Image (cartoon, rainbow, N blue to C red):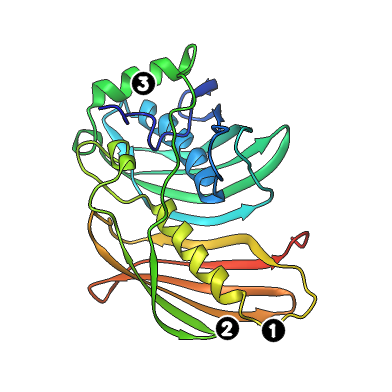
Amino acid sequence: MAARFSAFSFVDRITAFEAGQRAKGQFAVPAGLSSFPACLVAEAVGQLAAWVAMAHVGFRRRPVAGLAGETRFVGEVTPGQRLDLEVELESCDDDAVAYRGCARVAGEKVLELSQCVGPMLPLEDFDAPEAVQQRFQVLCGAGAPGGGFRGVTPPELRVVDRQPGERVRAAMQVPAAAPFFADHFPRRAVFPGTLLLDSQIRLARGLADELPRPGASPLIPARVTDVKIRSFIVPGQAVELEAQLSQVGDVVEATLTARSNGKPIATGRLELSPRGLS
């Protein structure tokens, strides 16, 4: 499978490893991409934590989806830069992993994750344990060749209801097939939660751009809190996204909800602030 360990894999090398506790890693963002969204930086940190967790339980189980208490977007990442990743496990067993981590570029922090929890599910349901273990050995050795990631086409968001500057609902159709499903996951395709969050942020930013703010700096994502993924999203699934805004001073808050067949499948809160305001 040509896209395996490249279409949605964001750790090229594990440079430091303490079993069951912490790790450092790297990912070279391919220079040919048009952009590298912040949600993929969060994905890279989460994937490094997953490697530590899977190794800790002997590659019997792996974390899938879950909760993210806080994600702070501190800086931007551009194609051609190298991500330096760090994670620390707070706990890990057959049921769940709790961790925190960050990503840096040239020594400067660009993203920070905390209060993250992922349920541990049978690895063999999602991937071949032998292949995953072999990949881990490659990452802990000389590392894997970079440049395999070709980018992700964001799903189209079709607005179905809008109250300008206040609330918006949009329909999103998860693709029935996409290269990233080769990595996420070979035996059971799941739409990545970070791509869902990226779509929710795009929807909320478009709504926030409608707010009257003469002469003010553009609003950018600063922090996401209380992200909860309640169920898997599968290829071809229809999802309805909703964002509702409130404003406190210079900061705009958005309540994010994703539903399918009328049932909530993901929730979270987004803070947008003018560039330079943290």
For label 2, the residue is 165
For label 3, the residue is 135
Which callout, 2 or 3, points to the residue nearer the camera? Answer: 2
Image quadrant where residue 158 sits:
bottom left
Q: Residues within 10 Å of mark 3 (few under 14, many from 20)?
A: some
- Indicate the amino acid at tag 1: Pro
Residue 152, given in percent of the width and then of the height, sits at: 42, 46
Image quadrant where residue 32 sits:
top right
Of the two numbered discs 3 and 1 on the same chain, state the one appearing first in sequence.
3
Give the CA separation, mark 3 to mark 1.
50 Å
Q: Does residue 208 appear left or right of residue 124 in this picture?
A: right
Say above or below: 60 vs 169: above
Residue 14, given in percent of the width and then of the height, sits at: 51, 22
Say above or below: 170 vs 197: below
Nearer to the camera, 99 or 276: 276
Say above or below: 245 vs 3: below
Say above or below: 157 vs 86: below
Q: For residue 250, which numbered disc appears in the image?
A: none
Label 2 with label 1: CB-CB less than 8 Å: yes
Q: Secondary structure at mark 2?
A: loop
Q: Does residue 178 appear left or right of residue 52 in this picture?
A: left
Residue 190, given in percent of the width and then of the height, sits at: 28, 48
Seen at 41% across and 71% down, the residue is 257
- Indicate the amino acid at tag 2: Gly
Residue 26, given in percent of the width and then of the height, sits at: 56, 27
For label 1, the residue is 212
Q: Quadrant of the C terminus?
A: bottom right
- Indicate the amino acid at tag 3: Arg
Of the two numbered discs 2 and 1 on the same chain, state the one appearing first in sequence.
2
Which callout, 3 or 1, points to the residue nearer the camera? Answer: 1
Give the CA separation, mark 2 to mark 1.
8 Å
